[in-house]
Amino acid sequence: MKILGYSERGIINSLIFSIGEDKTLMREFIKLIKIPEIEESRDSITDYTIFLEQSFSRFGDSDLVIILEYENPEHKKVLFIEGKVKTSQSKKWDLENQFKKFEREEKYIGSSSNLFFQLYLKKLLFDNCNEGDFALGIEEPRFKENRKIGNNKVVLKAISLVRECQEAYYIGLIPSNEEDVTTFSGKTDFKIHFLSWFHVHEFCKKEERLKKVIEIFDYNEGQIY
């Protein structure tokens, strides 16, 4: 039997389900992101909680959320990961262009799917989710919209776990190459880490357990990066 998934979500789902409960392999995947605060820490990660395609209501969905758990529960960290792809109809996905669009003062068609805006909303969510009046909504400064988490029980379960985390990191899983990331000149008021699909692809090639993910990459050839 062959199971094929489409585009970034197909690959992310295949990757996570292929890793399964192998904590060592999950640790190796997280190392690809190269977050100094995690990689240079003496604390060892003991477990993971992973959300796939999790809704956060008016704060947007997340392609992938990973909570890192430590022996000391006060050290929990959360990674918000948003995936973007080139698509087969496009010659290139441009990081600088995404940022220029993010800086626009007015809304535009597709603004809600902009990488920087999606991560910006996750930061807004994390920075305010422990506030007493969070349920009443948070005004999103850019477009002056009131963002509410709502009453969906599954969403609230996810929020309760995110609230336990002390730090959050924001990651763009993107089709850009290393040079484009290195020369990227855009500056946000919060740190964004970038991970290229190329490095994820190469990581999967080296791991026998991830050969199914390679099949999904092959199926989406020309669509991802």
Image (cartoon, rainbow, N blue to C red):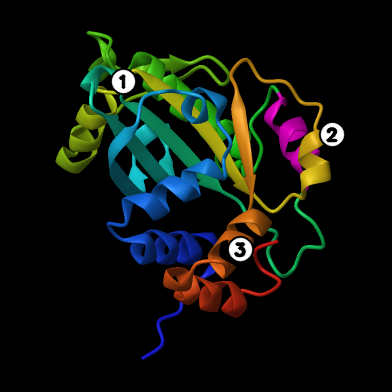
- Prevailing secondary structure class for the magenta stretch in the rendered image: helix
Q: Nearer the viewer, residue 96 or 134?
A: 96
Q: Estimate the spatial distance between the alpha carbons at disc 2 and disc 3, rounded to whole Å.
A: 22 Å
The crowding category of the residue bearing disc 3, from other C-alpha atoms within 10 Å (few below 14, some 14 to 19, many at least 20), is some
The crowding category of the residue bearing disc 1, from other C-alpha atoms within 10 Å (few below 14, some 14 to 19, many at least 20), is some
Q: Where is residue 97 in the image (x, y as percent from the top left)?
A: 79, 39
User: From the viewer's perspective, is the residue at label 2 or at label 1 nearer?
Assistant: 1
* Quadrant of the snapshot with the N terminus: bottom left
* Above or below for 180 versus 71: below
Query: Residue placed farthest to the left in the image?
Result: 153
Q: Nearer the viewer, residue 219 or 23?
A: 23
First reached walking from the N terminus: tag 1 or tag 3: 1
Q: Mark 3 points at which residue?
A: 201
Q: Mark 1 points at which residue?
A: 75
Q: Nearer the viewer, residue 25 or 142?
A: 25
Q: Nearer the viewer, residue 42 or 135?
A: 42
